[in-house]
Image (spheres, rainbow, N blue to C red):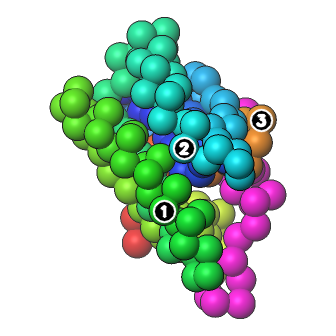
Amino acid sequence: MIVLGVDPGYRNLGLTLVRISADQSAAKVVFSQNMSVGKATAPMAFTKFLWPELERLNKEYGPIEAVASETPPFIMGQIKTTAFLWAVSSIIVAWTHAREIPFRHASPLSLKKAVCRATGKEWNRKFIPKKSEVNALIEQLTGERCHSSHENDAALAAILMFSKAIPDV
């Protein structure tokens, strides 16, 4: 199964395609990229090319059979940024809905807890896994690291939501 993992952002959007084995025990990164889909002076620019990029990935590497995303956060005091993150996510959700592709999302906190479970570290509020630990976990699970932490976060979402490689609670 090919799963598109998404780390939402309008300035840095992580997209990673992960091949999940038939028994759901193994994962391999097929493709990853960190897209800058907007800029502070023209944040809605992503609306012009995000859907076509999803189409390209589906045609070139697909068919994409599922999509997993980190749930966009609500950022206190940054309402514009929050709105743009949700707008980007809405385009991706609409694209999956138009193709009848399963879509799942997980909160940033549940992704961090999954890193703890996968690495055998005890979760508590004083220990929150860092980007380097996510990167190391993706390398451990897939045999390679993606180019950026956004791509690794996207891979983590795909693996957590559609494989059995990370133990459940």
Q: Secondary structure at mark 1?
A: helix
Location of residue 152 in the rendering, given as x and y in whole percent from the top left corner: 66, 45
The residue shown at (54%, 51%) is: 8
Q: CA distance from mark 2 to mark 1?
A: 11 Å
Compared to residue 84, the image places residue 15 above or below, namely above
The residue positioned 71% from the left and 52% from the top of the image is: 40
Query: x%, y% of residue 51?
Result: 43, 27
How many C-alpha atoms fall within 10 Å of the one at disc 3: few (<14), some, or many (≥20)? few
Q: Which segment did they paint magenta?
A: 124-145
| Residue at the disc numbered 1 | 83
**Residue 139 magenta-drawn?**
yes
Q: Is residue 162 visible?
A: no
Q: Nearer the viewer, mark 1 or mark 3?
A: 1
Q: Which residue is mark 2?
A: 44
Mark 2 and 1 residues: CB-CB less than 8 Å, in contact?
A: no
Q: Nearer the viewer, mark 2 or mark 3?
A: 2
As shown in the figure, which amino acid type bears the numbered disc 1?
A: Ala
Residue picked out by circle 3 = 147
- Given residues 112 and 67, the one toward you in this image is 67
Work out whether residue 100 or residue 112 is closer to the camera in this orientation and state it.
100
